[in-house]
Every structure is written in C-alpha cells, then in structure tokens.
Amino acid sequence: MYNSLLALFLCAVSLSADRQPNVIIIFTDDQGSVDLNCYGTKDLTTPHMDSLAKRGVRFTQFYAAAPVCSPSRAGLLTGRYPVRAGMPGNAGSTKGRPGLAPDEVTLAETFKAAGYATAHIGKWHLGYTPETMPNGQGFDYSFGHMGGCIDNYSHFFYWQGPNRHDLWRNGKEIFEDGKYFPQMMADEAVAFIETNKDKPFFMYYALNTPHYPYQGYAKWLKHYAKLPYPRNLYAAFLSTQDETIGNLLATLDRLKLREDTIIVFQSDHGHSHEERAHFGGGSSGPYRGAKFSMFEGGLRVPAIISWPGHIPEGVVRDQVSHSCDWLPTLTELAGVQLHQKDIDGLSIAEVIKNKNAPTPHKVLHWQIGRGNNPRWAVREGDWKLLGNPQDTSNKASLTTKDKLFLTNLEENVNEMVNLAEKHPNVTQRLKKLHDEWAAKNVK
C-alpha cells in the first residue's frame, strides 16, 4: 500500500514540476563521524551544514562505501561496492595513473543521459588519465585536483616528492597561484549554477576539506584559539568549509532554486589520524576507529538529504543506509532512468519519507585491498564482524586473537569488546557470508 502511495506521490511531483529537480552532492573529505552540531558536537560552529538537517533528513546509521578516499568515491558514483567497481584501494596522485574504469556507469553519466548538465567541482582522486578524469566519466564541466590532496594556496601535491602541481579545468592544467582553493570551488559552483539555472543540473561538489593540510581562515583560527591542539586547527578548517557551503546555499536561495534542488551531504569516511593531519583533530564520538579502519569511526559518517517542499524536514532516520544507495535513491526521486542495474545500492526513498520504513539492507559488505589478508567487514542486523581489523584511533590495542572481531552494535556501539569467542556460531555465520560474497565479487 505504501509503495503505491509513494509511486503516486513521486509521479504527481514529476508531472506538476516544470522540470526535473537539480541534484547537488556535497561530499566532504576526512570529516569525523560526529563533527557537526546536529550530530551532538558542542565545540564547533557549523550553521550552514546544520541548516541542511533542519530542512531535510539526517541519518544516524549511514555508512561510507569504504574507510579511505578513492574506494569511497567509487562506491558513491557507481552505486557498486568499490571492489566490484575496480577500486579496492586509493588511485594514484600522479599523471598517467589509471583509476575508475571508463566502462563503469557513474551518477554523472546517468543524469547526463537524462538531459542534465553535469559538473565535477573539487577533488577527484579516481584516475589521472584522460579517460578516467571527470570529463571522461560523464561530467560536462570539471574543475579541481586529480590527486589525493593539494596545498590550498599553491595547488601543489607536496607531501610525497617530487612536488607536483595539480589544478585542472576540463582536462587542461591551469595555474591560479595564491588563490584559496575552497573559495575557488565555491566561485566555480556559483558560476555553474547561474549558467544552468534554467535547466536541470547535477553537481558533484567534492570538497577537499577538512582533509589535511589544515588551512582554515585566520578568523576561524582566532575563533578556536582556546581549543586544544590539534582540534583547533581541524575546527578552523571545518568552519571554513561550512562558510563556503553557505555561499553555495545562498546562491540557490538567491536564484530561488532551493525547492527545485535535491542536496545530499555526506563525508567520504572518518577523520584522519595521519601525521600530516597532526595525528588527529576530528572526532568519532562514541565510536572506535577513524580513517582506514573498518570500526564504526572509519565507516559511520554524517549524511543528510534536503529537498524542501518534497521530503520531510528536521527529522532523523536511524535505519541502516549506505552511500551506494544514493544512485538508486536519487534516480527514483528525480524520475531519472537507472541504466546500470548491476549495483549494490538500494533505494532509501521510502526510508526518507517514512520513519517506520525498514532498512532495505539485510547485509552490508566492505573490503579494502585484494590478495592475502585484506581488511573487511560484514554487518547483518546488529551483528558486525571485522576481518584483520585496524584501530587507527588507537583507542585500544589489538592482538592475534582479534583477527576476527565480532561486535553487537545495539549492545556495544563502541566496539571495545570482541565477542567472537563468546558467540562462535554468529562469528562463523558472518564469516561465511563474507567468504561467499568475496569469492563471487572480489576478482
């Protein structure tokens, strides 16, 4: 009954609208699981990101496709588990390095086929050859860097020598010495929106913030001067990010496009504890783990969808959801044909509209790397099993007995106790689920 009502509602929206809705995906980089006021953090100033939750649906059990950059992006853009999309690990940050295979069908290609203008603005990190750069993957317009990160003023990839300049527009290298990259992103987004305001557009707004190097505005560094190091540096960069997102939202409001635009907000994975990130700064709150880790702090991310006047506003959804779900969900909401049927994502449109709708997922899988001893995880209901776990948050040590790590997230969301020996039958059942999935899908 509810499915029929939902279909009638979506049909009515499509028929009554002058055009299909615009779609903007705001994808942040290395943002901690709880690092927004609307997720309970008290020491940050994030009004613009929080405004999306006030005018939309916020998720509490939303998972990235991977705990590291390139695989997470591949999962988002293709709706397929990263290992199935051919991205089990990070793409290179050097010219000539391949990435996401051109025959993978991306969100951009899907919406472009439906008549949308498409744009990539920001970080790519999914290939550094013409066919694997954004213009070869369905984006009409592209501006940003192709590797994993850049200095925000010089636009050089500097932390692994030799230093390499990395700033591109539509496949051609450009030089904009001294200009602040997050603000450049905002300016590029505004120009694209203004150019395409009279027709539907799809924008992948892939921020490189709050990924290192932490280079927040001076006013925010002053604002957070009393926070302990390195939280102060991370916080300043995150509030700078919030300010640039505010510029984007203000443009939609000025052009009266907010109710015509679906906005998705998500972090690509948990915060970083790498040396280049000052060994921390972000927060996973009650969760164990961070970037690179299959514990919740590496995978459970802030995620919001906003479409004022069309979906609920100011509500929370606790159902398990996954970033691969955005492809089928957005095509359903926008009335766009889904061309690639062999995907792992499932539409969460019913979850978005109805707090009582069940999660579409019985089981979720993650894996980083191939070959011997890859890191992996599987979740079934409240049970989660990790293989070869890594705790990058260093909340507790792991031993050889933890090679298989079982937790019940309803009872122990902090994942500090390994229940594998206490529940051997559950451990073996979930191990079998992973083994059968890997044998079929990991080539």
Image (cartoon, grey):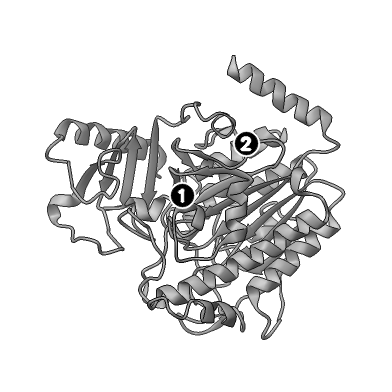
* Image location (x, y in percent) of residue 45: 54, 65
Instruction: Give yes or no for contact between labels 1 and 2 (Cβ–Cβ under 8 Å).
Output: no
Q: Is residue 134 left or right of residue 76?
A: right
Q: Nearer the viewer, mark 1 or mark 2?
A: 2
**Mark 1 packing: few (<14 Cα in 10 Å), some, or many (20+)?**
many
Q: Is residue 127 above or below residue 151?
A: above
Quadrant where the image shows the N terminus: top right
Query: Vertical placement of 271 versus 153: above or below?
Result: above
Q: Is residue 192 depicted above or below 222 in this figure?
A: above
Crowding around mark 2 (Cα neighbors within 10 Å: few <14, some 14 to 19, many 20+) is: some
Q: Which residue is mark 2?
A: 312
Label 2's element? loop
In the rendered structure, which amino acid carries the disc numbered 1?
A: Ala
Q: Which residue is mark 1?
A: 64
**How many labels were placed on the picture?**
2
Question: Which picture quadrant has residue 165?
Answer: bottom right
Look at 71% across and 55% down and name the residue there: 139
Who's the residue at 38% across and 55% down the image? 298
Residue 6 x %, y %: 65, 23
Task: Please name whichever residue, 344 or 230, is drawn nearer the observer in this view of the structure.
Answer: 230
Residue at x-position 13% and y-position 51%? 401
User: Where is residue 429 drawn, in percent x and y?
Assistant: 24, 31
Q: x, y (%) of residue 235?
A: 48, 71
Disc 2 marks a residue whose amino acid type is Pro
Q: Which label number is shown at residue 112?
A: none
Residue 338 can be seen, yes or no: no
Quadrant assignment for the C terminus = top left
- The foreground one among 105 and 14 is 14
